[in-house]
Amino acid sequence: MKTKTEELRRERVEQWKASGLRAEEFAASIGVNPRTLKNWKWLLGAEEARKRRAAEASKPAFLELVASRTIKGKSSLLRFSEQSELPAVGAATLELILKTGHRVNVPTQFDASALRRLVDVLEAR
C-alpha cells in the first residue's frame, strides 16, 4: 500500500518530467532541494525496475506448447496441455515458442537434455 508521501513524490516527479524544466528549476518552483527531486526519480525508477524483474521472473519459460501434425496436406494444431496423447496419424512434432520469439519444432520422441541445452542457448541471446 502506498502512503500519501509516496504518491506525492510520484506526482511531483511526473510533473517535473512533463514540465521540461531542469531539476534545479523545477525543484526551486516546488521548494525542494534538486538532489531530493533527483533521488525521488531514482527511487521510483528502481521500484519500476524491481516490478519488471519480478514480472519477468514469474513468466513461464515457454509461452506456449502446441502439438502439430499434418493430415492429408492440412495442418492441425492441438493444445498439448489439453491432449494427453497425440493421434497416431501423421508425423507429430511439438512446437515451442520461447520468450525470445524463437520457435523450435521437435519430434515427440526427443532427448530432453539436448532440448534444454538448445532452449538455454536461444534464450541467452
Image: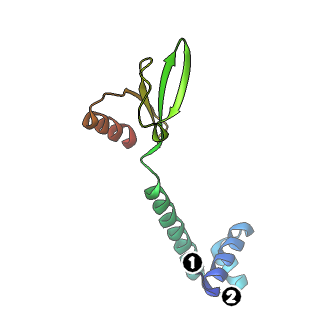
**Residue sitting at 37 percent across and 43 percent down?**
124
**Could you tell me which secondary element the residue under label 1 belongs to?**
helix
Query: Which is closer to the viewer, label 2 or label 1?
Result: 1
| The one of 103 and 86 positioned closer to us in this rendering | 86
- Can you see residue 20? no
* Residue 18 x/y as whole percent: 73, 67
**Residue sitting at 53 percent across and 28 percent down?**
77
**Relative horizontal placement of residue 114, taking residue 81 as reference (left or right):** left
- Can you see residue 88? yes
Relative to 116, residue 67 above or below: above
Q: Residue beneath label 1, please?
A: 40
Label 2 Cα crowd, 10 Å radius (few <14 / some 14-19 / many 20+): few
Residue type indicated by callout 1: Trp
* Residue 12 x/y as whole percent: 68, 78
* Residue 21 x/y as whole percent: 70, 70
**Residue sitting at 26 percent across and 32 percent down?**
111
| The one of 123 and 91 positioned closer to us in this rendering | 91
* Residue 41 x/y as whole percent: 58, 73
Label 1 Cα crowd, 10 Å radius (few <14 / some 14-19 / many 20+): some
CA gap, disc 2 to disc 1? 14 Å
Q: Residue beneath label 2, please?
A: 31
**Relative horizontal placement of residue 111, taking residue 9 as reference (left or right):** left
